């Protein structure tokens, strides 16, 4: 199974990626993990990426593409993979198609986790984090026993800057402008499978497994 997971921030891609990769016995490939591994290993690509990051600049698509290509040439992806966080735009999607065509291993499916913006804002803006142990809570779905205090260590709970409504709305705007076009791209390729990302985590996982299994059987 060769999969790409797409969806807006707050749709639960990271959580679902772990469960789906485990179910289908394929490696979960996160672009964040690829970057960290290359930077930690001081690879040529990692040093190049770090040179941009140290200047506060975005890492160019060309560097990201080369990192993903290198990762997809490793032995553990011979029987499949789940890409999370890549591609982020249609150019990257075209590059990925070319990489996989060269290997004669095309994608089986692209799974979209679909969620309304209003639900995303409620989900993300309601998160609270412990300043001491970093445990996460939610003011609507997972409150602490004592308001403003962590159940585990008693630390103060706070709202991270990137969980503010203004920042979330900006992230959604960036997603709509830069990343959402890949949904139309993959629909045109006949690869897109879309499921609602509402409900319990296990419900969404079962929904995803069912949709993917039916589509590639």
Image (tube, rainbow, N blue to C red):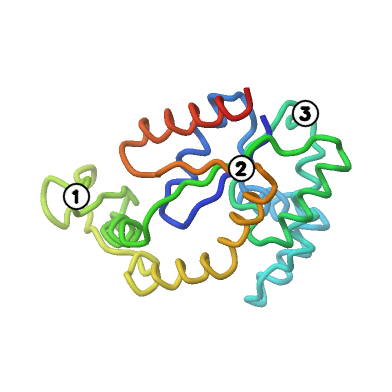
Q: How far apart in space, not on screen, are marks 2 and 3 (Cα)?
A: 18 Å
Q: Earlier in the sequence, mark 2 or mark 3?
A: 3
* Quadrant housing the C terminus: top right
Q: Earlier in the sequence, mark 3 or mark 1?
A: 3
Mark 3: which secondary structure?
loop
Residue at the extreme left of the image, as rendered = 146
Q: How far apart in space, not on screen, are marks 3 and 1 (Cα)?
A: 47 Å
Location of mark 1 (residue): 154
Vertical arrangement, residue 154 with respect to residue 162, above or below? above
Mark 2: which secondary structure?
strand
Location of mark 2 (residue): 110
- Residue drawn at the location 36% of the way across and 69% of the way down: 161
Q: How far apart in space, not on screen, are marks 1 and 2 (Cα)?
A: 42 Å
Q: In front: mark 2 or mark 3?
A: 2
For the residue pair 24 and 190, the one nearer the viewer reads as 190
Left or right: residue 15 versus residue 68 is left
**Label of residue 216 in the image:** none
Location of mark 3 (residue): 78
| Spot occupied by residue 118 in the image (x, y as percentages of width and height) | 31, 61
Vertical arrangement, residue 12 with respect to residue 200, above or below? below
Left or right: residue 98 versus residue 212 is right
Q: In front: mark 3 or mark 1?
A: 3
Q: In front: mark 1 or mark 2?
A: 2
| Spot occupied by residue 51 in the image (x, y as percentages of width and height) | 73, 70
- Residue drawn at the location 52% of the way across and 46% of the way down: 112
Mark 1: which secondary structure?
loop
For the residue pair 132 and 144, the one nearer the viewer reads as 144
> Label 3: how many residues lie within 10 Å, few (<14), some (14-19) or many (20+)?
some
| Spot occupied by residue 88 in the image (x, y as percentages of width and height) | 63, 59
């Amino acid at each position: 199974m060769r999969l790409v997971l797409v969806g807006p921030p707050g749709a639960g891609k990271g959580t679902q990626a772990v469960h789906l990769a485990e179910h289908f016995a394929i490696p979960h490939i996160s672009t964040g993990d690829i970057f960290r591994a290359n930077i930690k290993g001081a690879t040529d690509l990692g040093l190049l990426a770090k040179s941009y990051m140290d200047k506060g600049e975005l890492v160019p698509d060309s560097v990201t593409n080369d990192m993903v290509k290198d990762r997809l040439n490793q032995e553990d992806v011979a029987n499949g993979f789940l890409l999370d966080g890549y591609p982020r735009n249609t150019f990257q999607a075209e590059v990925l198609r070319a990489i996989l065509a060269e290997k004669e291993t095309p994608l089986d499916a692209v799974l979209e986790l679909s969620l309304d913006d209003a639900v995303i804002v409620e989900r993300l803006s309601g998160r609270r984090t412990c300043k001491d142990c970093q445990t996460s809570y939610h003011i609507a779905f997972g409150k602490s026993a004592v308001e403003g205090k962590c159940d585990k260590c008693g630390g103060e709970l706070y709202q991270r800057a990137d969980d503010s409504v203004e920042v979330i709305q900006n992230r959604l705007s960036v997603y709509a402008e830069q990343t959402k076009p890949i949904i139309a791209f993959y629909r045109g390729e006949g690869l897109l499978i879309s499921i609602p990302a509402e409900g319990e985590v296990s419900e969404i996982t079962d929904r995803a497994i069912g949709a993917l299994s039916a589509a590639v059987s």
